[in-house]
Image: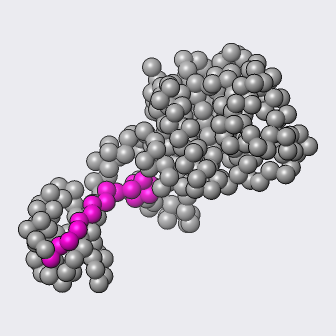
Amino acid sequence: MDAVVLENASKIFGETEALKRVSFAVPQGCCLALIGHNGAGKTTLMKLILGLATPTAGRVSVLGCDPASAGKAFRKQLGFLPENVSFHDEMTGADTIAFYARLKGVGVRDGEKLLERVGLAHAAKRRVKTYSKGMRQRLGLAQTLLGKPRLLLLDEPTTGLDPLLRQEFFQIIKDLTAAGTTVILSSHVLTELEARTDLAAIMRDGKLAAFGDLDTLRAKAGLPVIVRARGDVAAISGRLNGAFHKIIGPDSASIEIDCPQDEKMKLLRKLAECGDICSDVEVRQPSLDDLYLFYCGRSLNAAGEGGL
């Protein structure tokens, strides 16, 4: 069953068309990376999925319902963590999670367990105004997980988290999707999404520029692989003799080769024939950053945008 389905969904605010005929489906239990430059339509898309806005045209279905008209029982199945999470400063972490637990009809004890899960049990009795940015973010994640929602929407959820906490956060996401929860995750830090999401939706100027798993996106893009060979750089270069696309990064100990996908095995065989002069070979597939730039980088440059 698909947890989220959009069919030609469009949204117009005044004279601005924020979304333009967007169509895709997210299967239950998947983690979707929703990426795009500022103003690409990501926030509008999340609002449609949450039922906070209705499409001007097209259809949006979430967990089999129209999110804009569904009732309380439907909304209890959703969890949302905004980019800039905000709580009442004078309440403690425990009071905050208990308040949201009551709103969602969940036992307070469940909220206490979530504080432990996100690493805030030691600070449960402290007022939120004493929390760091990372602690507030973890409190927001605990609030989002109340009631074991079937769909989570997380906007820049790792902001303010150190590397260890980021790792723990993604372990929580992995456990949730393994249990059948669907997660839509929006972030500008593409490197941390690459190995942790099942699908990617790349937005550009209100349109869906690309959608699919990374292997599918790589195949459609046809971007070259980067092969790094270590050893006797001059000898390796001589053996290759310009047979491949181009050598892009020689240094004193290694050489990088920009190789078309269909020539990868031929290049690897050639390097294997080099014997001892080639001590190591590393193959790097196009990253999510590379794919993002391919599918919408030129548009960003033309529009004068500096980045994501």
Numbered disc total:
0
Tell me where the magenta segment starts and ends, as one range. Answer: 277-292
Residue that sits furthest to the left in the current view: 273
Q: If the image is split into quadrants, where does the C terminus sit?
A: bottom right
> Where residue 159 appears, x then y in whole percent?
65, 53
Which residue is pictured at 70% across the width and 51% down the height? 134
Q: How is the image coloured?
A: one colour
Establish if 59 lies above or below 308. Answer: above
Which residue is pictured at 8% across the width and 68% down the height? 273
Quarter of the image where one finds residue 98: top right
| Residue 288 horizontal side relative to residue 256, left or right | right
Q: If the image is split into quadrants, where does the N terminus sit?
A: top left
Residue that sits furthest to the front in the current view: 122
| Residue 260 horizontal side relative to residue 63, left or right | left
Establish if 306 lies above or below 99. Answer: below
> Where residue 51 appears, x then y in whole percent?
66, 27
Quarter of the image where one finds residue 183: top right
Quarter of the image where one finds residue 233: bottom left
Q: Is residue 258 magenta?
A: no
Establish if 120 lies above or below 283. Answer: above
> Where residue 112 appears, x then y in whole percent?
74, 31
> Where residue 37 appears, x then y in whole percent?
56, 54
| Residue 221 horizontal side relative to residue 199, left or right | left
Which residue is pictured at 76% across the width and 20% down the height? 107
Report if residue 151 is visible in the image. yes
Instruction: Judge by depth and name the residue closer to the eye, 195 or 220.
Output: 195
Which residue is pictured at 46% across the width and 44% down the height? 196
Report if residue 258 is visible in the image. no
Instruction: Judge by depth and name the residue closer to the eye, 267 or 20.
Output: 267
Instruction: Judge by depth and name the residue closer to the eye, 23 or 246.
Output: 246
